[in-house]
Amino acid sequence: MSAYFFFMAEQREKVKAENPSAGVAQIGKICGEKWRSLSAGEKTKYEEMNRKDKIRYEKEMAKYKQSSSSEESSESE
């Protein structure tokens, strides 16, 4: 996920409540405008969330690959 997606996840319900007649595309447009208007400092929170999630993903993927390769080894025996 990207920093923007973390921002969207946090903002979507608020934007929907403020714009009850807006469709999915309109909500995305509003959230995009809000994201673009954030300062670099305001985006830091979401960038940090993205960084932590990337580390989590890399750990899980390494664990998956390790278990996958050990399963392949045991199947070939």
Image: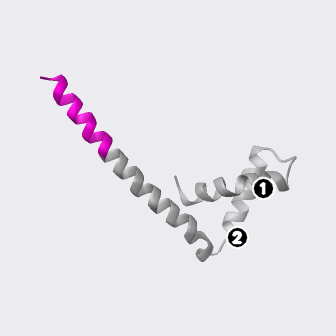
Q: Camera-side residue: 9 or 23?
A: 9
Q: Residue at x 16, y 30 (%)?
A: 73
Left or right: where 69 falls relative to 43: left
The circle drawn on residue 15 is 1
The residue tagged 2 is 37
What amino acid type is highlighted by mark number 2? Answer: Ser
Q: Camera-side residue: 3 or 55?
A: 55
Q: In this picture, is 19 found above or below 73? A: below
Q: Position of residue 4 (x, y in %)?
A: 60, 58
> What kind of colouring is applied to the model shown?
one colour
* Label 1: element kind: helix
Residue farthest left in this picture: 77
Left or right: where 46 falls relative to 14: left
The circle drawn on residue 45 is none
Q: Residue at x 21, y 34 (%)?
A: 70
Q: Position of residue 38 (x, y in %)?
A: 67, 71
Sequence-wise, the earlier of marks 1 and 2 is 1
Q: How far apart in space, not on screen, are marks 1 and 2 (Cα)?
A: 15 Å
Q: Position of residue 41 (x, y in %)?
A: 59, 76
Q: Residue at x 85, y 53 (%)?
A: 19
User: Hey, which quadrant is residue 35 in on the image?
Assistant: bottom right
Q: Residue at x 12, y 23 (%)?
A: 77
Does the magenta stretch mainly form a helix, a strand or a loop?
Answer: helix
**Within-10-Å neighbours for mark 1: few <14, some 14–19, many 20+:** some
Q: Position of residue 66 (x, y in %)?
A: 25, 41
What amino acid type is highlighted by mark number 1? Answer: Val
Highlighted range, magenta: 63-77
* Label 2: element kind: helix
